[in-house]
Image (cartoon, helix red, strand yellow):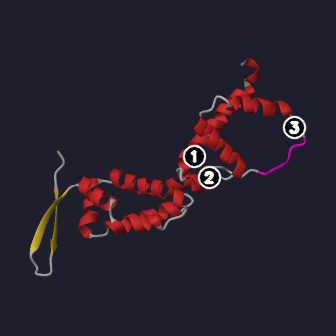
């Protein structure tokens, strides 16, 4: 069983109050904290704010318990969280940036000199028949706009969910088109 920690403070009449606090209570109080939620709400892009919040609290959950209680008792845990939010959101080298912000590497458009093969279109439409209606519609919206972030804004579907769906559909369609002759 986890040992409860004591946090002491004085009110304006200098009476000392004792409050027993454990790790889960601290993390829960911070998770619903108005200040922390406002700080995360100021980060861009909007679609990654919830992912950022989860990553920040993952850092807290993995933190050494003694260090967490020390920062909490010394009163600078919120400062630490805000600093972590800024580092994750603004740094190009953070785990958050590598995991969530870098979706693709830009490539040069060298243009194709080969003639377009009409049978690919036929194979694509035949392969799309096996997709679930949700996957088919998301793929259609993405192909029309060419911008997954815009699709996320228009449909209010989380960006990461759309990204996973598009990757899954692309992989499935590549497989089906390459193996079309065998079907």
Majority SS type along the magenta span: loop
Q: State the image coordinates of residue 9 (x, y, percent, origin top left).
A: 16, 72
Tell me the crowding category of disc 2: few under 14, some 14 to 19, or many 20 or more residues within 10 angstroms, Cα based.
Answer: many
Asked whether residue 107 is in view, the answer is yes
Which badge, 2 or 1, comes first in the chain's sequence?
2
- Of residues 109 and 160, the one drawn nearer to the viewer in this rendering: 160
In the rendered image, which quarter contains the N terminus? Answer: top left
Splitting the image into 4 quarters, where does residue 16 fall? Answer: bottom left
Q: Secondary structure at mark 1?
A: helix
Residue at 63% from the left image edge and 42% from the top image edge: 137
Placement of 139 over or under 41, stated as above or below = above
What quarter of the picture does the C terminus occupy? Answer: top right
In the current view of this chain or complex, which residue is farthest to the left?
15
The residue identified by callout 3 is 116
Residue stretch rendered in magenta on the structure: 108-113
Q: Are marks 2 and 3 in contact (CB under 8 Å)?
A: no
SS of the residue under disc 3: loop
Q: Position of residue 78 (x, y in %)?
A: 34, 67
Above or below for 131 versus 153: above
* Badge number at residue 162: 1
Q: Position of residue 104 (x, y in %)?
A: 65, 49
Q: Quadrant of residue 76?
A: bottom left
Q: Residue at x 54, y 53 (%)?
A: 156
Query: For mark 2, what is the residue?
Result: 151
């Amino acid at each position: 069983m986890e040992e409860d920690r004591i946090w002491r403070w004085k009110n304006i009449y200098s009476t000392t109050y004792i409050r027993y606090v454990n790790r889960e209570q601290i993390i829960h109080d911070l998770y619903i904290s108005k200040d922390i939620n406002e700080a995360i709400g100021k980060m861009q892009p909007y679609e990654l704010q919830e992912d950022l919040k989860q990553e920040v609290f993952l850092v807290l959950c993995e933190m050494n318990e003694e260090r967490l209680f020390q920062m909490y008792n010394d009163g600078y845990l919120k400062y630490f969280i805000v600093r972590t939010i800024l580092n994750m959101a603004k740094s190009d080298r953070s785990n958050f940036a590598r995991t969530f912000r870098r979706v693709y590497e830009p490539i040069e458009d060298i243009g194709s000199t080969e003639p377009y093969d009409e049978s690919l279109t036929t194979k694509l439409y035949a392969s799309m028949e096996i997709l679930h209606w949700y996957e088919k519609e998301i793929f259609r919206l993405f192909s029309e706009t060419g911008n997954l972030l815009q699709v996320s804004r228009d449909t209010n579907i989380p960006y990461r969910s759309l990204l996973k769906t598009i990757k899954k559909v692309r992989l499935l369609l590549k497989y089906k088109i390459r193996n079309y002759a065998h079907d």
